Image (cartoon, grey):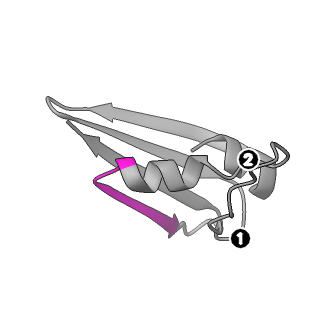
Amino acid sequence: MTTSPCRVHGPVTHVLCHGGACTLELTVHANSPQVPQMPPPDLNGGTGGFGRPMVNRLASTNAVTRRACGSEALSARFAW
């Protein structure tokens, strides 16, 4: 969740982690006016593209939200 914003959208400003009895919630804030797109996986090892699809499959919920300051927040909640 942190490499894509760093590589494509600009610097990550902070990462928030919250843990519960059976959940983990991660939020990544990035300075970018662009909403991240789902990249196709690169099977030749050049650009990656596996992280976000993996997060989407493993997370019980996930979202990309725009913040008032013009940046974005990517969040995912994992339950076990």
The amino acid sitting under disc 1 is Gln
Res. 66 visible in picture? yes
Q: Which of 8 and 11 is in front in this view?
A: 8
Residue bearing the label numbered 1: 34
Residue type beneath disc 2? Gly
Q: Is residue 17 magenta?
A: no
Q: Which disc number belongs to residue 75?
A: none
Mark nearer the viewer, 1 or 2? 2
- Quadrant assignment for the N terminus: top right
Identify the element where label 1 is drawn: loop
| Residue at figure coordinates x 73%, y 47% from the top left | 48
Q: Residue placed at 66% from the left, 42% from the top?
A: 13
Segment colored magenta:
58-65
Is residue 10 something that shows in the picture?
A: no
Asked if residue 12 is positioned above or below residue 67 in the image, the reply reads above
- Figure label count: 2
Q: Position of residue 21 (x, y in %)?
A: 14, 29
**Of callouts 1 and 2, which one flags the residue occurring earlier in the amino acid sequence?**
1
Q: Which of 26 and 39 is in front in this view?
A: 39
- Percent position of residue 33, x then y: 72, 69
> Which residue corresponds to the image point at 78% horizontal and 55% vertical from the top-left?
8
Residue that carries the numbered disc 2 in the rendered image: 48
Q: Is residue 36 left or right of residue 8?
A: left
